[in-house]
Amino acid sequence: MTRAAGARTLLTMCALLATVGVVRASPISPTWDQLDAHQQTVLWSLSDEWNRYAPSNKHKILNIVQYYDKLSPEQQFRVQTKLKAWAGLSQEQRDLARANWKKLQALPAAKRKAALSRLTENQAVDTP
């Protein structure tokens, strides 16, 4: 994967994670073993690092599970692909993705829409 493709993947994953709300889950910061079978199935690619995530990140990610079954098979595959890509990033790469997402969110709406459109077009070109 090229650096540009990796950056686009990171931005897309950040977009997915940033657009979800906070899940009301118990306990406050569930360990991997405390997740139910369905949550573990959907989030399997994050299992190795799950217990190191901050509680707020866990809740954002758990919100994905609520909507997962309503997604088409193609959308589910995309979510799994993005989760796996995110899990494979170093902390520095994740920090960069988050910083880039914040920069994107700071843009005026029209520029943000144009940037996201270019990102989507570039991903379509990079996808086999």
Image (spheres, rainbow, N blue to C red):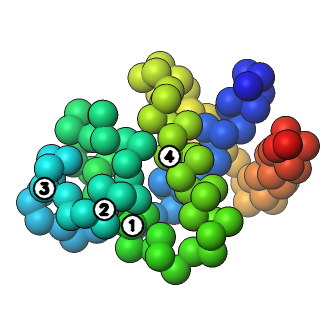
- Determine the residue positioned at 39% across, 66% down: 65
- Badge 4: few (under 14), some or many (20 or more) residues near its Cα, within 10 Å? many
Secondary element at image label 2:
helix
Disc 1 and disc 2 in contact, CB within 8 angstroms: yes
Residue hosting label 1 = 65
Disc 1 and disc 3 in contact, CB within 8 angstroms: no
N-terminal label among 4 and 2: 2
Residue hosting label 4 = 83
N-terminal label among 1 and 3: 3
For the C terminus, which image quadrant? top right
Residue type, mark 4 in image: Leu
93 to the left or right of 119: left
Disc 3 and disc 4 in contact, CB within 8 angstroms: no
Estimate the x, y position of residue 28 in percent, counting from the top left. Answer: 12, 57
Residue type, mark 1 in image: Val
Residue hosting label 2 = 39
- Badge 3: few (under 14), some or many (20 or more) residues near its Cα, within 10 Å? few
Disc 3 and disc 2 in contact, CB within 8 angstroms: no
- In the rendered structure, find residue 34 and report the number of the disc placed on it: 3
Decide which of 61, 33 is in the foreground and name it: 33
- Determine the residue positioned at 63% across, 56% down: 78
- Badge 2: few (under 14), some or many (20 or more) residues near its Cα, within 10 Å? some
Secondary element at image label 4:
helix
N-terminal label among 3 and 4: 3
Estimate the x, y position of residue 44 in percent, counting from the top left. Answer: 37, 48
Alpha-carbon span between mark 3 and mark 4: 20 Å
Judged from this view, the residue extending furthest toward the bottom is 70
Residue type, mark 3 in image: Gln
Residue type, mark 2 in image: Gln
N-terminal label among 1 and 2: 2
Estimate the x, y position of residue 50 in percent, counting from the top left. Answer: 27, 41
For the N terminus, which image quadrant? top right
